[in-house]
Image (tube, grey):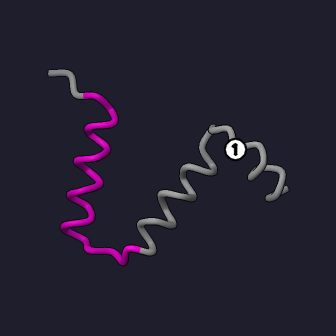
Amino acid sequence: MDVPLWLALIVVGWLGIKLVRPPWWLVILLLLGGYLIAESFLGPAVGSLIN
């Protein structure tokens, strides 16, 4: 059975939020930080700010 990565991440994220119940600001901060640091079009800008 092949499950797309995006679907697996959504299911794991949903279960994590339901079971652990972190504050919403922490969830948003982790998602935004992960998006910015990942190899996206904003990645080089964040890298130059850190260095």
Residue 16 drawn at (x, y percent): 26, 61
Residue 14 drawn at (x, y percent): 24, 56
Q: Residue at x 63, y 38 (%)?
A: 39
Residue 45 drawn at (x, y percent): 78, 48
- The quadrant in which residue 23 appears is bottom left
Name the side, left or right, on which 45 lies relative to 9. Answer: right
Residue at the far bottom: name it. 23
Please tell me whether residue 40 is drawn above or below residue 19 in the rendered image. above
Query: What secondary structure characterizes most of the magenta part?
Result: helix
Instruction: Describe the element under mark 1 as helix, strand or loop.
Output: helix
Residue at the far front: name it. 41
Q: Quadrant of the N terminus?
A: top left
Q: How many marks?
A: 1
Q: Residue at x 28, y 28 (%)?
A: 4
Name the side, left or right, on which 25 lies relative to 44. Answer: left
Amino acid type at image mark 1: Gly
- The quadrant in which residue 15 appears is bottom left
Q: Quadrant of the C terminus?
A: bottom right
Please tell me whether residue 19 is drawn above or below residue 44 in the rendered image. below
Residue at the far left: name it. 1
- Residue 25 is covered by the magenta coloring: no
Name the side, left or right, on which 31 lies relative to 24. Answer: right
Q: Residue at x 82, y 57 (%)?
A: 49
Which residue carries the number 1 mark? 43
- Residue 17 is covered by the magenta coloring: yes
Q: Which stretch did the figure color magenta?
A: 4-24
Please tell me whether residue 11 is drawn above or below residue 29 in the rendered image. above
* Circle 1 crowding by C-alpha within 10 Å: few under 14, some 14–19, many from 20: some
Q: Residue at x 60, y 44 (%)?
A: 38
